[in-house]
């Protein structure tokens, strides 16, 4: 039987406090997008842990690996091996145990990692007792910051590992909770170079989007779109307070992320094609001044209509252009789009105004043939 979690919806109920975790998830996604996007993946938000990167096998049926993150910020000072740190680690180890027991199908070589991540320096230290000092033992310090950003628990000095384990065990005994000791082998601790202020975090994300996706002119809009995908999933309650990776409502699919980025890039290419050819297009197709001034809204609305499979006439236009590449037959966009409009109307009974057919043809053309330069 699937275990119910008392904390299953605690993050949803504290939604306003999740901004750092959400931004951190997008930061990691963008920073490692080239590697992540080569695999079949999905993200879970507020599901087992703050966020999970889940990787599927090629057959898409089984989970082959999960990267689980507990993202924490700290006001003032730095993280040390204290009661608060021990509580966080204890919960993460419990998450590792829950992931192993989750009923989602897994590959035979399934593995997961549990990462405590923070934008605050982390100082893990051990001070020997007086008697130990007499035997020659000295202080041991392990720092995580910009010079050493990530460590596996297994690679941390033995004295510090033992101190962490003792502190976590002490916490579990006090709270009468499970001490999932075996999960220490999956534990990682990471410092991330991410600002404390939410506006500064957004600036970093926009800059990262610009570096990773230089062909998207409106990088701020792209960041906001991806964050909105995260918010939509984050706000969904775990039904019956049961956490289960089979619950697709708590996922942001990798395909959905790729599609969102492709749509933004295609919209921007369409804006550029319009700007480069607006004089000829507006005269040829008699585009009213009001539509010219609001061409970006018309283009965005048209892409929404083209995505909707129930819009039969837009689907007819989209299919016709997909199946008919006129780029080698004409010397200008106005001639080519004019031919598309004429042939589409001759081939099908389209009950749309010419201006709507024009924008549908324009957007579908850029989607399939993509070049926006003259």
Image (spheres, grey):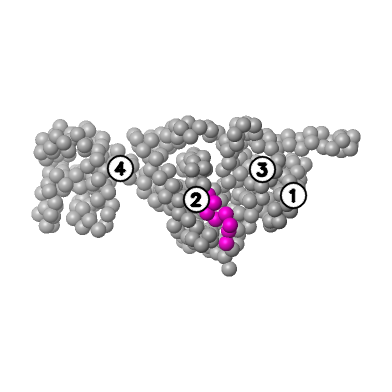
> What residue appears at the point 54 percent right and 51 percent down from the top-left corner?
10
Residue at point 87%, 35% (across, down): 130
Residues packed near mark 3 inside 10 Å, few (<14), some (14 to 19) or many (20 plus) = some
Q: Please give the residue where the numbered disc 3 appears in the rendered image.
A: 84
The residue sitting at 45% across, 51% down in the picture is: 235
Q: Nearer the viewer, residue 200 or 189?
A: 200
Q: Which residue is mark 2?
A: 12
Mark seen at residue 266: 4
Name the outermost residue toward the front.
13
User: Dot 1: within a 10 Å radius of its alpha carbon, few (fewer than 14), some, or many (20 or more) residues?
Assistant: some
Q: Is residue 9 magenta?
A: yes
Location of the N terminus (image quadrant): bottom right
Residue furthest to the bottom in view is 1
Among the 4 quarters of the image, the one containing residue 178: bottom right
> Would residue 67 appear left or right of 264 to someone viewing this image?
right
Give the SS element for disc 2: helix
Q: Is residue 337 above or below residue 134?
A: below
Query: Label 1: which residue?
Result: 170
Q: How much space separates mark 3 and mark 4, taking CA atoms? A: 47 Å
């Amino acid at each position: 039987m699937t275990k119910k979690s008392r904390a299953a919806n605690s993050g949803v109920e504290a939604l306003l406090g999740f901004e750092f975790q959400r931004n951190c998830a997008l930061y990691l996604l963008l920073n490692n997008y080239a590697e992540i996007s080569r695999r079949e993946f999905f993200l879970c938000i507020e599901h087992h842990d703050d966020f999970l990167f889940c990787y599927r096998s090629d057959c898409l049926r089984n989970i082959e690996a999960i990267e689980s993150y507990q993202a924490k910020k700290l006001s003032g000072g730095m993280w040390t091996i204290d009661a608060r740190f021990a509580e966080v680690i204890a919960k993460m180890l419990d998450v590792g145990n829950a992931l192993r027991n989750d009923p989602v199908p897994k590959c035979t070589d399934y593995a997961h990692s549990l990462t405590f991540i923070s934008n605050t320096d982390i100082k893990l230290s051990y001070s020997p007792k007086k008697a130990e000092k007499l035997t020659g033992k000295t202080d041991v310090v392990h720092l995580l910051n910009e010079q050493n950003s990530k460590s596996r628990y297994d690679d941390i000095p033995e004295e510090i590992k033992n101190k962490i384990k003792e502190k976590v065990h002490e916490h579990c005994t006090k709270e009468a909770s499970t001490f999932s000791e075996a999960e220490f082998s999956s534990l990682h601790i990471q410092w991330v170079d991410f600002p404390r202020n939410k506006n500064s975090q957004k600036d970093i994300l926009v800059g990262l989007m610009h570096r990773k996706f230089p062909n998207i002119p409106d990088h701020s809009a792209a960041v906001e779109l991806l964050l909105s995908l995260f918010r939509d999933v984050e706000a969904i309650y775990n039904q019956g307070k049961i956490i289960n990776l089979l619950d697709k409502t708590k996922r942001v699919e990798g395909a959905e992320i790729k599609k969102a980025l492709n749509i933004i890039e295609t919209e921007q290419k369409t804006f550029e094609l319009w700007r480069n050819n607006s004089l000829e297009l507006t005269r040829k197709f008699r585009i009213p001044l009001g539509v010219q001034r609001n061409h970006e809204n018309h283009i965005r609305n048209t892409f929404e209509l083209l995505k909707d499979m129930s819009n039969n006439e837009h689907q007819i236009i989209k299919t016709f252009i997909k199946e008919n590449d006129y780029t080698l037959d004409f010397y200008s966009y106005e001639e080519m789009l004019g031919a598309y409009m004429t042939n589409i109307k001759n081939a099908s009974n389209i009950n749309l105004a010419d201006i709507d057919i024009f924008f549908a043809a324009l957007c579908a053309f850029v989607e399939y043939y993509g070049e926006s330069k003259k």
